[in-house]
């Protein structure tokens, strides 16, 4: 959790510092919407490491440029956590999926380089017809990336938490964006 708190603090501090300066990092167009469709791969963190070994996902991100270097984001999609084999058996742990809905900010502090922070809720979909988990968790993520007019590649840490239960992922996202 301390890593997440530090990452979020660094993201917000960097955003505040660079938002207050007069840089010309025009990577997001002011008053324009952009839709990014991304593929993601990652490694589980927290409790997720016990039964899964990697994640794959797909996300859609709607972005609105408030200025030429600061944007608001709305992100949703899904991540699938692939199961490990239980030690001493040929059986696997159960795989599951996470469906996040997040809002956030993206700040470009030099051309094409950004810092992002998001927060929202995540719902868990259980394997083999078991349906939805009976609860939802909070979702916080922070990351950095490189974006051009159409391409966006970023690395982020995402934490799904509820009281003392933490799971999540460290992920790499490659997305293609189109202006709306």
Image (tube, helix red, strand yellow):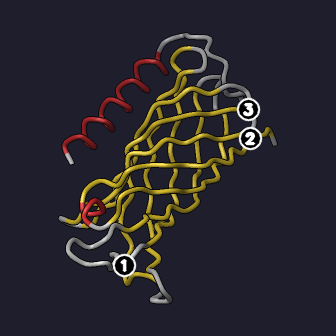
The quadrant of the image that shows the C terminus is top right
2 vs 1, front mark? 1
For the residue carrying disc 2, how many other residues have a C-alpha within 10 Å: few (<14), some (14-19), or many (20+)? Answer: some
Q: Mark 3 and mark 1: span between their CA atoms?
A: 36 Å
**Extreme-right residue of the structure:** 180
Q: Which numbered disc, 2 or 1, marks the residue that appears first in the sequence?
A: 2
User: Above or below — where is 34 with respect to 100?
Assistant: above
- In this picture, residue 30 sits left or right of residue 56: right
Task: Identify which residue is drawn at 29% across, 53% down.
Answer: 45
Task: Identify which residue is drawn at 44% across, 49% down.
Answer: 42
- In this picture, residue 124 sits left or right of residue 179: left
Q: Position of residue 65 (x, y in %)?
A: 66, 33
Labels 2 & 1 near each other (Cβ < 8 A): no
Task: Identify which residue is drawn at 52% across, 35% down.
Answer: 154
Q: Which residue is mark 1?
A: 135
Of residues 11 and 77, the one nearer the viewer is 77
Label 2's element? strand
Which mark is on residue 33?
A: 2
- In this picture, residue 93 sits left or right of residue 28: left
Q: Which residue is mark 3?
A: 150
For the residue carrying disc 1, how many other residues have a C-alpha within 10 Å: few (<14), some (14-19), or many (20+)? Answer: few
Q: Position of residue 177 (x, y in %)?
A: 72, 39
Image-quadrant location for residue 157: top left
Q: Which numbered disc, 3 or 1, marks the residue that appears first in the sequence?
A: 1
User: Above or below — where is 92 with respect to 162?
Assistant: below
Q: Which numbered disc, 2 or 3, marks the residue that appears first in the sequence?
A: 2
């Amino acid at each position: 959790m301390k890593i997440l708190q530090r990452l979020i603090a660094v993201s917000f501090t960097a955003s505040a510092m660079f938002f207050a300066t007069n840089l010309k990092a025009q990577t997001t167009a002011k008053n324009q919407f952009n839709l990014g469709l991304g593929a993601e791969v990652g490694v589980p963190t927290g409790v997720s490491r016990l039964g899964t070994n990697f994640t794959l996902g797909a996300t859609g991100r709607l972005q609105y440029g408030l200025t030429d270097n600061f944007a608001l984001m709305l992100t949703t999609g899904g991540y699938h956590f692939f199961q490990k084999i239980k030690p001493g058996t040929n059986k696997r742990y159960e795989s599951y999926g996470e469906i996040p809905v997040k809002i956030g900010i993206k700040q470009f502090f030099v051309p094409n380089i950004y810092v992002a922070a998001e927060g929202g809720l995540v719902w868990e979909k259980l394997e083999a017809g078991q349906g939805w988990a009976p609860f939802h968790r909070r979702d916080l993520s922070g990351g950095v990336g490189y974006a051009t007019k159409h391409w966006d590649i970023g690395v982020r840490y995402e934490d799904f938490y509820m009281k003392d239960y933490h799971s999540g992922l460290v992920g790499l996202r490659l997305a293609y964006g189109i202006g709306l």
